[in-house]
């Protein structure tokens, strides 16, 4: 038996086995000590709230009732109505004071296909007290970029309209007369707000 333990290979195997046992015991003792941590972070979300003509469009995006046209005085046309050759304007006020990101706004103007008067044209617009920008497209789109932390967060667009009669018109006198029987006509104002990522 003594010879068995005197053999170098046997002693090496026993030492190796004891070494593995020691490592296992050390791992078990260290494995008893564990730590963990957990947290819940709260982050403020950037605001995204717009008002058009004092109406919150996040809760109600149909602001039709707030579009109030004003027609230019004409000795041949009654007040507050539109007829061939009429000119006038309406305003769209956009309040972005509760917006916490940079964004672009796109305003698209058009005459819907079912509108009784197809000869209404958007002739121009101005932003706040700026100069009038002429419009030539039947369905123009106006794009304005807004940076973060702008000083002026309420902007008023004034859109100018005209009922064409003569050059450029698509309706003849009979069509104009038929449209008068409808009692009202329609223009479309579509406003889109898009966050700017860069």
Image (cartoon, rainbow, N blue to C red):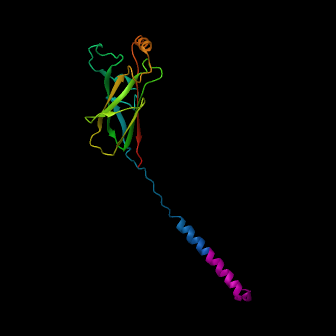
The relative height of residue 43 versus residue 107 in the rendered view (above or below) is below
Residue at position x 73%, y 89% from top?
3
Quadrant the N terminus occupies: bottom right
- Residue 27 in view, yes or no: yes
The relative height of residue 37 versus residue 18 in the rendered view (above or below) is above
Report the label total. Answer: 0
- Residue 190 picture location, percent across and down: 41, 30
User: Is residue 112 found inside the magenta-colored segment of the image?
Assistant: no
Q: Residue 116 falls in which quadrant of the image?
A: top left
Residue at position x 29%, y 44% from top?
150
| Nearer to me, 23 or 106 | 106
Q: Main secondary structure of the magenta part?
A: helix
Relative to 178, 148 lies left or right: left
The relative height of residue 167 versus residue 157 in the rendered view (above or below) is above
| Residue occupying the far front of the picture | 167
- Residue 181 picture location, percent across and down: 41, 10
- Residue 5 in view, yes or no: no
Q: Residue 195 falls in which quadrant of the image?
A: top left
| Nearer to me, 120 or 19 | 120
- Residue 98 picture location, percent across and down: 33, 38
Q: Residue 136 falls in which quadrant of the image?
A: top left
User: Is residue 18 found inside the magenta-colored segment of the image?
Assistant: yes
Residue at position x 40%, y 18% from top?
185
- Residue 160 picture location, percent across and down: 33, 27
The relative height of residue 195 versus residue 160 in the rendered view (above or below) is below
| Nearer to me, 27 or 46 | 46
Magenta part of the chain:
1-20
């Amino acid at each position: 038996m003594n010879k068995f333990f005197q053999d170098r290979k046997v002693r090496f195997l026993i030492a190796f086995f004891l070494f593995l046992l020691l490592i296992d015991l050390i791992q078990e003792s260290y494995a008893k000590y564990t730590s963990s941590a957990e947290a819940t972070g709260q982050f403020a979300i950037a605001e995204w709230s717009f008002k058009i003509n004092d109406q919150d469009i996040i809760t109600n995006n149909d602001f039709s009732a707030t579009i109030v046209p004003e027609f230019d005085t004409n000795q041949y046309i009654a007040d507050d109505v539109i007829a061939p050759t009429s000119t006038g304007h309406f305003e769209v006020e956009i309040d972005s004071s509760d917006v916490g990101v940079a964004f672009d706004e796109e305003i698209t103007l058009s005459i819907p296909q079912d509108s009784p008067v197809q000869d209404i044209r958007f002739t121009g617009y101005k932003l706040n007290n700026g100069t009038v920008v002429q419009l030539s497209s039947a369905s123009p789109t106006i794009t304005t970029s807004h940076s973060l932390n702008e000083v002026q967060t309420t902007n008023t667009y004034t859109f100018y309209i005209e009922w064409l009669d003569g050059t450029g018109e698509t309706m003849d006198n009979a069509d104009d007369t038929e449209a008068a029987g409808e009692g009202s006509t329609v223009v479309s104002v579509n406003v889109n707000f898009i966050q700017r990522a860069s």
